[in-house]
Image: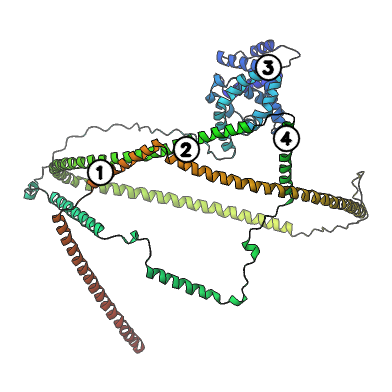
Amino acid sequence: MLSYKELLRICIEALNIFSPDDQSVEEFIKDFLKRRPGLNDDDHTFIVEVLSGCFEFRKVIKVVVDGFHVLDGRNSLASDTNLFNVLCYLILFRLDELGMSHMKKFIQSQDVNKMYKFLRFFLSEANLDTWIYSEWCKEYDSQYVQEKIMLPLIRWKPQLDEHVEYLRAVVENRIPLKKTDVPLTNPQPFNITKPKPRGVPMPDKIPKLTRHKPVPEHLYRQPKEIENLARIREENRQKAEEFLLETESDQFKCANAEKSTRANMVMNRIREEEEAKLNFNKRHSQPIPKSMTQNRPIKMNAAAILREGALFRKKEGEELVKLEKLLDGAKDASEFESWQQKKLEKDRKQKETDLERKRMQGKLSREEAIIARQRKAKENQEKVTEMKMETAEMMQEFLTLRMEEEDQMRSLVEEIMAGHENTKIVKERLKEYKRKLVQDVNAQSRELMKQALEDAEAEMRRKIELIQEIRAMESIPINRNKLVDLTATAGHALLSEMSIVELRERLSLLKEEKKAVEEQRRDANIQEKQAKNDRLMENLACISVHRREMTKAAAMKAKQQSELADRQKRDLESDENLQKLKKQLEDKKAERLKLSRELEVKPTPSSATRTRKLLKERKQQETTRWRQLESSQMRLAKLRAGNLSSVPTRDKSNRGTAIIT
């Protein structure tokens, strides 16, 4: 089985040596394959099919490949033409048989830059759907081209475009190359002589363990965690009821969005004071010009005037043609337009009623969903109570398992303590071995460092000698002055050779000729500008007339639209189905509010008194805590003041001792 690259190479070699004038296609393929006897059946079939297909559809393939060489492949080699022919044939006629995986392997076996450039040109919609399709239709029937060539290519085009993007990423070095996995080294055990079995040593005496303490009695009692959890649960419930009472009695400050009258008065006074500060240069200020407050027409440029004038002239021509047709006896389309307008109005009314009905149905379904959610919440509350009972039972089972595990761990610790005494001797031997190994490694590293320093010194001496030789060669002076004669030629023996003086004279003559041509162009431009201004004035007059008529038509249209909106509103209010849906929606809202009132938590008188007591206790705790904080801060301040007062005296005493010494 040959590789993908080898198969493409054989096909390209056959296309390169084929001559249609000397031999037929069948004979050439037979003779070519006789010279390659080592091919198996699959490779033989592939080469025969590709060569016969390239010869049969050479007109279709030639359109793509020749266009590529003319447009995008100017720098591509002529030897790559048959490579592009084979790939074009495989994509157009054999992609269904090969599959995308084999096609990718054929493409990746060649140079990435060549493949990306050719496939980007071939699969581009700007080329494939325009001139390539038209050239194929010149050679074959359009139906054959559409069914046999275009449809399979369009079906595979998304996957081909994806592979083209992958090639683009490879060309731009955005995909890292895959690293080949190096096989790991499998260590083999050393062939060491097995030691002889040792004699069984005498067993050591089993040490007698100290008598263990008896199991404490608190392990058989119920743990305090369960009582703490019940107490915390009751406190959380009381806090929730207390918070509920606070929210019902006190309103949030953010609920009242309006400011008070006093706040508004203060804000107005501050605003007036800030504005009064800006009147320092009032007598020098100037009023806003009227041109800034009035609506001025927008000044149009020449392109806009010509474009709008051409549009209005086109509309005038269309109206004249329509009037001429009416004079000749053509039928007026006003009846059809009125009938069409009535139908459109009817369809619009039906559409609006359907939209309103769907909106009401959506609101109705929302209410039903809220009711179902509330019922689900009620069911969840019942499930929570059941789960709490189950968790209590599981907690009891967990405690029993915990006691059993503690007994097992206690026995395991006693066994480990007995085995720790034998590990000390092994640790001391290991430390001695590591110490000797470190000493050997340090000696070897010192020898290697000494050898490296000697090599570096020899290399440095050689570089210094080489630099001295180069500097001595550069110090020799060189004369680089050269005399120039502007009247003499360079002496290259060319037909158009001239001196610099002659060149300057010719350039001055060319400048005078260019100046005369510019004067002629300037006169022609002035005449063209005058004619253009005349045309613009004519177009402006036409535009002003048409705009006046368009404003009148827009006013009439706005009036009709307002009347139409009023009529639509009356039609929606008179629809019976919508009224029924509104009634159903109100019923569902009432049912939802009823369920929400049932799910609300209502405090009892006993819980209310308990929450009041808790509020009072919490306030007392806060006051005591603040008093403690204040007292602690006062103590810290006194201590700091005492430390600061003692610092200068210590400095003075130190200074006095220094003077005495």
The three-letter code of the residue at mark 3 reads: Phe
The answer to which of marks 4 and 1 sits earlier in the sequence is 4
Which tag is nearer the camera, tag 3 or tag 4?
4
The answer to whether residue 432 is above or below residue 340 is below
Label 4 belongs to which residue?
Answer: 323
Which disc is residue 352 wearing? 2
Label 3 belongs to which residue?
Answer: 55
What distance separates the C-alpha of mark 2 from that of mark 1?
34 Å
On the picture, is 523 further left or further right than 316? right
Which tag is nearer the camera, tag 1 or tag 3?
1
Disc 3 secondary structure class: helix
What distance separates the C-alpha of mark 4 from that of mark 1?
72 Å
Quadrant in which residue 121 is drawn: top right
The answer to which of marks 3 and 4 sits earlier in the sequence is 3
The answer to whether residue 566 is above or below residue 477 is above
Is any part of residue 64 visible from this angle? no
Instruction: For the residues labelled 2 and 1, say whether their Cβ atoms are less than 8 Å apart.
Output: no
Disc 4 secondary structure class: helix
Disc 1 secondary structure class: helix
Q: Residue 61, image x and y in percent? A: 67, 22
What distance separates the C-alpha of mark 2 from that of mark 3?
64 Å
Which tag is nearer the camera, tag 4 or tag 1?
4
On the picture, is 310 further left or further right than 11? right
What distance separates the C-alpha of mark 1 from that of mark 3?
82 Å
Q: Crowdedness of circle 4 by 10 Å Cα count: few (<14), some, many (20+)? A: some
The answer to which of marks 1 and 3 sits earlier in the sequence is 3
Quadrant in which residue 652 is drawn: bottom left
Q: Residue 20, image x and y in percent? A: 74, 15
The answer to whether residue 494 is above or below residue 261 is above
Q: Look at 61% across and 33% down and name the residue there.
A: 337
The three-letter code of the residue at mark 2 reads: Glu
